[in-house]
Image (cartoon, grey):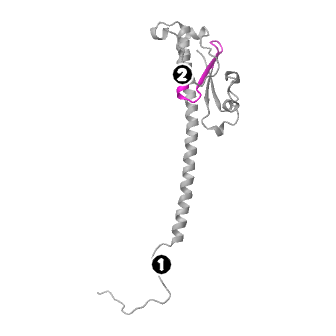
Amino acid sequence: MRDMVFVGRKKAPGRRRQGGVGMIEVLIAITISAFALLGLAGLQVAALRYQKVANFRSLASQYGSDIGDRIRANAAGAIAGNYTAGGTYSAAYTATSPSCATAGACTPGEIASVDIDAWRLAMNRAMAGGWGTVAGDSTNGFVVTVYFSEPDKSLAATADPGCDSKVFPTTMSTSDKAAMRCFLMVVMP
């Protein structure tokens, strides 16, 4: 069988078939896509900001555990009270380890001093404003406080109530004090 071909059939006048996508449809599609991409970019920026905050808080927890392990490893120094390390906050900490650190024959008190110096130096290098204090005793436990500067200044509108303001130097501005965050933990040797 052959296909039937209609010869002489004409299209009705005034009816035209659309040959492509109109410019308005293209413009609407581009506009919707642009808004969607801007929304995704905003989400990405927010995710990076909160990831940085979470990273600093995680580091504070790790450094708190680090000094806790050092205190437990040097029980004689902890019982003698050599780990209580107060002092004034320093944004640019430099270690002042005793000379026995290189010789390898330190007393428990000197080991505690080396531990505190290494701990503070590591925090200062890892986190903006990294600093730490240890208070308390071996009977009631040591309160370890890790200080760090909040990376997201919009979250740093008010001072952290857990921070001991006596640690900060008097020359530190109010806004810098408000940006400081504290992580506290209790360590039993």
**Residue 95: image x %, image y %?**
54, 17
Q: Residue at x 58, y 44 (%)?
A: 46
Residue closer to the observer: 130 or 145: 130
Q: Is residue 165 left or right of residue 18?
A: right
Gap in Å between the C-alphas at discs 1 and 2? Answer: 72 Å
Q: What is the quadrant of residue 59 in the picture?
A: top right
Q: Residue at x 70, y 29 (%)?
A: 161
Which of label 1 and label 2 is nearer to you?
2
**Relative to 26, does residue 39 appear above or below in the rendering?**
above
Q: Is residue 103 left or right of residue 137?
A: left
Which of marks 2 and 1 precedes in the sequence? 1
Q: Residue at x 50, y 87 (%)?
A: 14
Q: What is the quadrant of residue 92 in the picture?
A: top right
Residue 130 among those drawn in magenta: yes
| Callout 1 amino acid | Gln
Camera sees residue 177? yes
Magenta region: which residues?
A: 122-143
Pointer 1 local density, CA inside 10 Å: few below 14, some 14–19, many at least 20: few
**Residue 7: image x %, image y %?**
36, 92
- Label 1, on which residue? 18
Pointer 2 local density, CA inside 10 Å: few below 14, some 14–19, many at least 20: some
- Label 2, on which residue? 121
Camera sees residue 142? no
Residue 32 among those drawn in magenta: no
Tell me whether the residue at label 1 lies in contact with that at label 2, contact meaning CB atoms closer than 8 angstroms.
no
| Callout 2 amino acid | Leu
Extreme-left residue of the structure: 1
**Relative to 84, does residue 15 appear above or below in the rendering?**
below
